[in-house]
């Protein structure tokens, strides 16, 4: 069973884009067959019979250091276009992550900085130094990655300053249109085919990309932290999850809204890509943001830094430490 799944995901990554263009008559039935299998595999009955499909990772972590971004991609799985915010972790938060890691004896294979666009964080290079220091002192074999969109002169200038011992995963975007992105805002819980799904199955991302650390806490994956930012369920963990914590409660709460839960046929119409749960969540998020703007004085960057992660405050929406402190030329790279 596992071999079939690995073969399918290899096909999806390496061959499917070509097949879709050149041999659609073969691609469609293959997709349909595996889609049916996937829906069955995550059903409550199959989960009882075979166990959960994916396990959360203990060795890899994605750290979303900021939700600021200079692009507004369709189907962004951090909701950048619909819930624009520069909520960020601080260097101090990352230092606390390192302290917790060392204190708990956690042994990472891979740490990746992501976002948003992580190079827009005003403390980006300092945060990298915190992680490099952790590697030098405590874990020489950990690989440190930066995931960047590589878009715009400002971002490229920062990338050029990244030390050579960091792996740069540059998706080299040329704009906000992403033809290959899955319909992230198509919530499985809004689709009839998922009415018997067990969301504690998670998806391949938690197993292969790792858990996530975000401004809302630790999650089964960093995407889940972005979902919680919008839905406001507040289910993030405040400390690194212990090995005996499978994070099933988070998967049950958040994977039901995530378009990555199973591979999907991509609807052509844009409005079919935003199902009812997301429409409501974005409307609620905008309401909460407007209320917060009215009721709070503009927070200082220092105040945000103190409360960013460990007390999990309400999500900051419009006050923008990035806007205040990022070099102008970076933010001007934005197309929108
Ligand atoms: S570059 Fe990444 S984070 Fe930014 S909008 Fe596009 S998908 Fe979202
Ligand atoms: S939130 Fe989405 S990406 Fe993360 S484990 Fe669940 S289905 Fe996968």
Image (cartoon, rainbow, N blue to C red):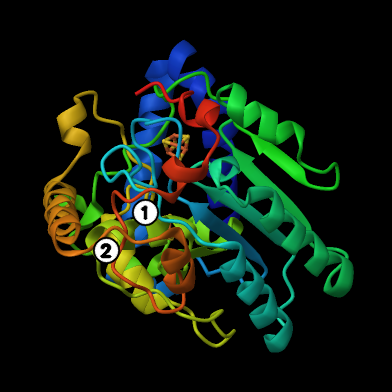
Image x and y of residue 235, in percent? 34, 75
Gap between marks 2 and 1, in whole Å?
Answer: 10 Å
**Which tag, 2 or 1, sits closer to the chain's start?**
2
User: What residue appears at the point 16 percent right and 59 percent down from the top-left corner?
Assistant: 288
User: What residue appears at the point 13 percent right and 57 percent down from the top-left corner?
Assistant: 294
Whether label 2 touches label 1, CB < 8 Å? yes
Q: Secondary structure at mark 2?
A: loop
Image x and y of residue 259, in percent? 32, 47
Q: Nearer the viewer, residue 287 or 166?
A: 287
User: What residue appears at the point 43 percent right and 41 percent down from the top-left corner?
Assistant: 323
Q: Which residue is mark 1?
A: 261
Q: Mark 2, mark 1: which one is toward the viewer?
A: 1
Instruction: Classify mark 1 as within 8 Å of ligand 2 or not, answering yes or no.
Output: yes
Q: Which residue is mark 2?
A: 197
Q: Nearer the viewer, residue 37 or 10?
A: 10
Res 79 quadrant in image = top left
Do we see residue 142 in this rendering? yes
Res 172 quadrant in image = top right
Q: Nearer the viewer, residue 119 or 18?
A: 119
């Amino acid at each position: 069973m596992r071999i079939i799944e690995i073969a399918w995901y290899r096909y999806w990554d390496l061959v499917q884009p070509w097949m879709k263009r050149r041999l659609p008559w073969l691609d469609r039935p293959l997709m349909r067959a595996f889609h049916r299998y996937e829906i069955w595999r995550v059903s409550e009955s199959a989960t009882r019979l075979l166990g959960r499909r994916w396990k959360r990772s203990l060795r890899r972590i994605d750290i979303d250091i900021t939700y600021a971004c200079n692009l507004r991609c369709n189907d962004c799985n951090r909701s950048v276009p619909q819930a624009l915010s520069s909520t960020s972790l601080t260097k101090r938060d990352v230092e606390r992550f390192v302290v917790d890691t060392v204190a708990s004896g956690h042994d990472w294979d891979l740490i990746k900085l992501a976002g948003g666009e992580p190079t827009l964080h005003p403390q980006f290079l300092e945060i990298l130094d915190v992680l490099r220091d952790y590697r030098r002192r405590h874990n020489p074999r950990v690989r440190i990655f930066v995931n960047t969109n590589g878009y715009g002169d400002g971002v490229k200038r920062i990338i050029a300053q990244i030390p050579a011992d960091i792996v740069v995963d540059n998706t080299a975007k040329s704009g906000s249109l992403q033809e290959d992105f899955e319909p992230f805002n198509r919530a499985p819980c809004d689709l009839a085919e998922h009415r018997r799904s067990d969301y504690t199955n998670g998806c391949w991302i938690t197993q292969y990309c790792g858990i996530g650390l975000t401004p809302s806490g630790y999650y089964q994956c960093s995407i889940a932290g972005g979902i919680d930012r919008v839905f406001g369920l507040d289910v993030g963990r405040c400390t690194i999850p212990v090995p005996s914590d499978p994070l099933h409660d988070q998967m049950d709460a958040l994977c039901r809204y995530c378009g990555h839960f199973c591979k999907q046929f991509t609807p052509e119409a844009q409005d079919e890509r935003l199902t009812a749960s997301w429409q409501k969540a974005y409307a609620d998020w905008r309401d909460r943001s407007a209320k917060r703007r009215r009721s709070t004085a503009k927070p200082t960057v220092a105040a945000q830094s103190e409360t960013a992660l460990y007390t999990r405050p309400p999500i900051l929406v419009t006050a923008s430490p990035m806007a205040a402190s990022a070099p102008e030329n970076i933010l001007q790279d934005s197309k929108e």
